[in-house]
Image (cartoon, rainbow, N blue to C red):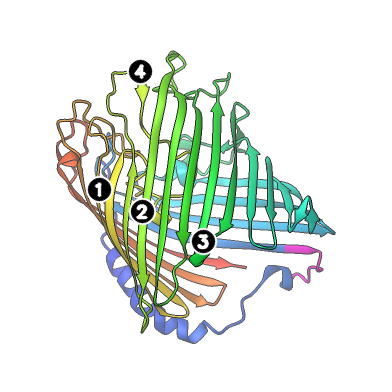
Amino acid sequence: MVRQPCSGIGFCLALAALSAPALAQEIAKETPWRLGDALGAPDWLRISGSIRPRYETLGATFLAGRTGGDELTSLQTLLKVEALAGDFVFGGEILDSRLLSGNAGGGAPGEVNTLEPAQFYAGWRPKNFLAPGASQSFDGARAVWTSADKLKLTAFYVSPTTREPADLVSALDNEASLDEDYGNVRFGGADIEAPLPLGLVGELYLLELNEDDDASQATRNRDLVTIGARLRRAPAKAAFDLDLEFAGQTGAVRASANPADTVDLDHDAHMLHVEAGYTFEGPWSPRLAFQYDEATGDRSPADLSSERFDALFGDRAFEFGPTGLYGAIARTNLSSPGVRLEVKPDALSDAYLMARRIGLNAPRDSFGGTGVRNPAGASGDDVGLQVEGRYRRWLVQDSLRLNLGAAYLANGDFLETAPNAAREGDSLFAFTELVWTF
C-alpha cells in the first residue's frame, strides 16, 4: 500500500496563488539576469539555461495495478551553449533532471534524466539556399524552407532516443546513464504550411515510423504511415478562432513487444480534433472555446487488425491535462467533448479552466496509458469527468515564472467496474513549479 501524499499541499498552493500577484508587482519590472551577459560572452557565443523546481501530488491513482496516492519533488536544470560562425551554428544542451523526494516513484522513470547531454548539433542556416528564407539544421536531419509569402516546408528524418535509466530503482537513486539512440527505430516526415484567406492557415503533413527488433531492444515492429490535414485561425480579440485537424493512419503493428509475438496486425486508425472559440473584448480578455477530440481504439482484441490510434511522439499537457504523476488522457481510444475558459488578468499572468467528458471510442480496449481494460466491453464507455485548471504569472518578466495547476477526475462506470481498475475513488492532482530562465 502506498502512503498518501502530504495534506498541506492545498494550503501551500492557495497561499502561493494569493501572494503571487502582490509579489509580482514588486519585482516584475526587474531586468532579467542572463548568464551570457554575466560571463561577458562575445556576440558569437550564446549561453543560456533554465532551472525548474516542481512539486506534484496525486491522491487516489487510476492506473491498473497501483493503489494509494503518490507525490514527487523534482529539479530540472538545463544549460545551452551555441557558437555562431557565419551561416553555421554549433551547439549543445546538457540536461539534469532528478528526483529530490517522493513516496512511491510512480512518475520517477519518466522524470529522472541525470546529467544527460540532451543534444549536440551542427546547423547551416543560409539566408537564400534553394529558396529565399531557407534554413537547415541537423539533429538527426531536419530542414526548413520559408518563403517571403510565409509558405513553409519542413522535412526531417531522425532516430529517436529513449530516456535512461528506465527502471524505477535506478530512477529513485538518480543514477546517471546516457540515453540510448534507437538505431532500429526511424522516424521521418514532411509538413507544408500555407496562409489562406480570412486569416486561416492550412497544413498538410505525412509522418512515417519504422521500427524493428534488435539485440538490445524489443519493439512492436510498428510500420506506420500517418497522413493529416489541419486548418486553423489564431485567437484574436472580438473574433472567432478555430482549429480543425484530421489524421488517418495505416500500416502494420504487433500486439506487444514480446519477441515471441511475430504476428503482424493490419493497422487502420484515425484521430479528429475540433475546436471553436471566441475572444471577448473587455477586462481579462476571456476566451470561451468548445472542443471535441476523438481517436480510435481497438474494437476487438481477438482479431488480426489494430484500430488503436498511435500518437507517436509529443506532449499532451497543452490539451489533455497535466503530465508527470497524472497524465490520465492520451490521444488514443478516446471520445471527449469539452469546454474551456481562458483569461488574462493582466500582462503578466494567464489562467484557464476546462471541463471535459471522457469516453472510450472502443469499450473493449484500454483507456489511454492506464492499462485499465474490460476485454468483454461490459464496463461501458463512460470513463468520467475531468476538470482542470492552471494559473501562470511572470514574477520577473521573461525570467522567473510561477506555475500552479490542478486536475480532478470523477470516475465513471468504466473506472469503477473494469476488472483491473484501481477502484481508489476519484483522483485529485495538483502541482506547483517555478521556472527561472537565464
Q: Amino acid at mark 4?
A: Leu
Q: Which residue is mark 1?
A: 358
Q: Earlier in the sequence, mark 1 or mark 3?
A: 3
Q: Earlier in the sequence, mark 2 or mark 4?
A: 2
Do the CB atoms of the residues marked 3 and 4 lie less than 8 Å apart? no
Left or right of 119? Residue 392 is left
Q: Quadrant of residue 78?
A: bottom right
Q: Nearer the viewer, residue 244 or 105?
A: 244
Tell which tag, 3 or 4, sits nearer the viewer: 4
In three-dimensional space, the C-alpha distance between marks 3 and 2, rounded to whole angstroms, equals 33 Å
Tell which tag, 3 or 2, sits nearer the viewer: 2
Q: Nearer the viewer, residue 414 or 425?
A: 414
Q: Which residue is mark 2?
A: 274
Q: Which residue is mark 4?
A: 304
Q: Amino acid at mark 2?
A: Val
Secondary structure beneath label 3: strand
Tell which tag, 1 or 3, sits nearer the viewer: 1
Q: Position of residue 423 (x, y in %)?
A: 18, 41
Q: Quadrant of residue 299?
A: top left
Q: 10 Å neighbourhood of mark 2: few (<14), some, or many (≥20)?
A: some
